[in-house]
Image (spheres, rainbow, N blue to C red):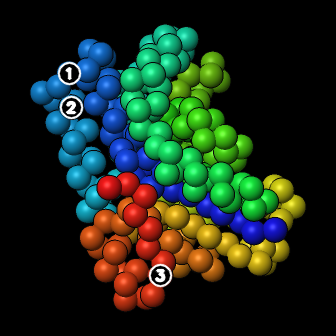
Amino acid sequence: MNLTLFDLDGTLIPVDSDHAFGAFMVEVGWADRAHWGARNDEFFAQYNAGQLDLPAYIEFATSAWRHRPLDEALAMRERFITQVLRPALRPEARALVERHREAGDLLAIVTATNEFVTTPFAQAFGVEHLIAVRLARDEAGRYTGAIDGVPSFREGKIARVESWLQGLGAQWRDFERVTFYSDSTNDLPLLERVSHPVATNPSPALARIAAERGWAQLQLFA
């Protein structure tokens, strides 16, 4: 069996779901545009520059919805799915996932976006295994704004994939081929770890690195 891993934002979808969910919070009036919306844009710029303080961002990003009743937050996420997720699902990305599924590969989406936002995306692609940033909860089950465990970000993606494989009774060496699709230099640790890295819709920086190292490049979206 082969193992195929997919980044989500900018890779399988042509948007950043984390930033888009924040923009949606502003659009529906759960966060103010002048301050909160501008800060959301600042964090997104930091991510693209490889300078994101992830714990600070998670505390900020969840602040727009985590203090509301969970059923209310879930209902708003459903609106986000309808208005943002579905239009972001492209046939080219679906075909890529299906090709690996039909080949019998073990599939997982490995993303630095939190599980609250990304669970519906994994479901939409029919990918059972989602490795996302886990959100801590208190004894009453309320989200705290903190990260639970190792975040699936940068080197943490490797640790989380290894932990997930161990839970399945597997290891890296069990797979003849391990492929990872990603658009971002933030994912260099995992791209360097797998046997078949694919720079997918790559940022200019990742495209340069991929060209220098002879990695495959794939442009899913025009």
Label 2, label 3: how far apart the Cα atoms are: 37 Å
The image quadrant of residue 26 is top left
Q: Residue at x 20, y 46 (%)?
A: 42
Q: Residue at x 72, y 54 (%)?
A: 101
Q: Secondary structure at mark 1?
A: loop
Q: Residue at x 48, y 78 (%)?
A: 216
Q: Which residue is mark 1?
A: 32
Residue closer to the observer: 202 or 129: 202
Label 1, label 3: how far apart the Cα atoms are: 42 Å
The amino acid type found where label 1 is placed reads Asp
The amino acid type found where label 3 is placed reads Trp
Q: Position of residue 85 (x, y in %)?
A: 45, 32
Q: Which mark is residue 215?
A: 3
> Looking at the figure, which quarter contains the C terminus?
bottom left
Q: Residue at x 47, y 39 (%)?
A: 89
Q: Which of the two marks, 1 or 3, is nearer to us in this view?
A: 3
In the image, taking residue 36 as reference, residue 157 lies left or right, namely right
In the image, taking residue 99 as reference, residue 28 lies left or right, namely left
Q: Earlier in the sequence, mark 2 or mark 1?
A: 1
Q: Position of residue 10 (x, y in %)?
A: 39, 53
Residue closer to the observer: 103 or 145: 103
Q: 86 above or below 179?
A: above
Q: Which residue is mark 2?
A: 37
- Would you say the residues marked 2 and 1 are in contact, meaning their CB atoms lie under 8 Å apart? yes
